[in-house]
Amino acid sequence: MRRRDLLALLAATAASPALAQPRSGPPPEIVHPRASHFAFGPTGDPWRIHVGLPDAPPPPQGYSAILSLDGRTTFPHLWNHREARAPKAPVILFGIGYEGANRRWRDLTSRAMAPVVPIPFYRAAPADRETGGRDAFLAMIGDDLLPELGRRYPLDARDMTIYGHSLGGLFVLHALFTRPRLFARHVASDPSVWWNAGESQREAQAFAGGVAAAGGVIGPKIQVMIAQAGRARQGHPHDPTSLVRILSGVGGLEVLYRPYPRENHGSLMGPATADALDLHLWR
């Protein structure tokens, strides 16, 4: 689909009443014959992998897939959108959640660091949260989980989307910067760009510089979507538009910016997961 057609579709679906989502509380767990989950990882401390099979046979090259972080909340949104909007699409859904203790701060962040000098609007991580495990988590996804999913289900490893919200969106950006070939599409919903005083922007600048030094263009094309709740506040640490500008200058990246001025951080997950599905379907 041409870019203008995708943008027109996104504009239309964002205004659609069918995308209305509950404004508080996590969505209910999906109970369906095609929905399941399994434990994956170390005994006593595994992740819960949510699986949503499509009502369609796999194409010759295998199913395409959407992998979402914070699976307990994101997986039901994606399931409901797919079943309502594209029930016969050969897209399998995966969500990474937790069996026991929620370790999302550890899994989705770099090590928390305090600035040497005072920084306006600086926000520290909660003192009781373990941080710094994102590279191990990304290695688990790329080197262990995706191969395991490929053994269990017929998948097209070249046709995968990763979705994350908040800290999950921050992690999606880090995955793009460090292992850009792992996923064909990256959707960051209200990413926590405030983390470590704008660390994601510094990562983006280094990524852009590396691409420029290597020839200036990424190939094949990678799609990146960044959704934002509320109104843009340029220069504010919660505003991702500076990041969008940096990435838009990288050859081979197709960057889509989706502002939602009427949504808040929590309510954005409904329309942003719909955007992720549309981007995946109309790639």
Image (cartoon, rainbow, N blue to C red):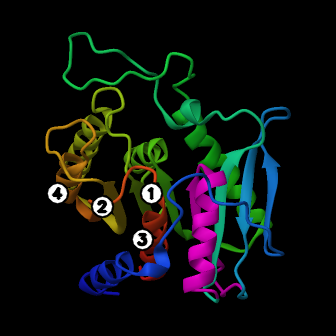
Q: Secondary structure at mark 4?
A: loop
Task: Confirm or deny contact between disc 3 and disc 2 (CB under 8 A).
Answer: no
| Residue for point 67% across, 35% down | 102
Q: Nearer the viewer, residue 240 or 232?
A: 232
Question: From the viewer's perspective, is the residue at label 4 or at label 2 nearer?
Answer: 2
- Vertical relation: 240 (above or below) 66: above
Q: Quadrant of the N terminus?
A: bottom left
Q: Position of residue 219 (x, y in %)?
A: 33, 66
Decide: few, some or many residues near mark 4? Use Cα within 10 Å; few <14, some 14-19, many ≥20: some
Quadrant placement of the C terminus? bottom left
Which quadrant holds residue 78? bottom right
Residue stretch rendered in magenta on the structure: 58-87
Q: On the picture, is 122 further left or further right than 267?
A: left
* Mark 3 and mark 1 residues within 8 Å of each other at the beta carbon: no
Q: CA distance from mark 4 to mark 3?
A: 22 Å
Left or right of 65: which side holds 226?
A: left
Q: Which residue matches tag 1?
A: 267
SS label for mark 2: loop
On screen, residue 215 above or below 109: below
Q: Which residue is mark 2?
A: 262
Q: CA distance from mark 3 to mark 2?
A: 16 Å
Q: Nearer the viewer, residue 252 or 272?
A: 272
Q: Secondary structure at mark 1?
A: loop
Inspect the image, locate mark 1, and give the three-letter code of the amino acid beneath it: Ser
The residue mark sitting in front, 4 or 1, is 1
Residue type beneath disc 3:
Asp
Residue 167 pos. (x, y %): 46, 41
Q: Is residue 76 magenta?
A: yes
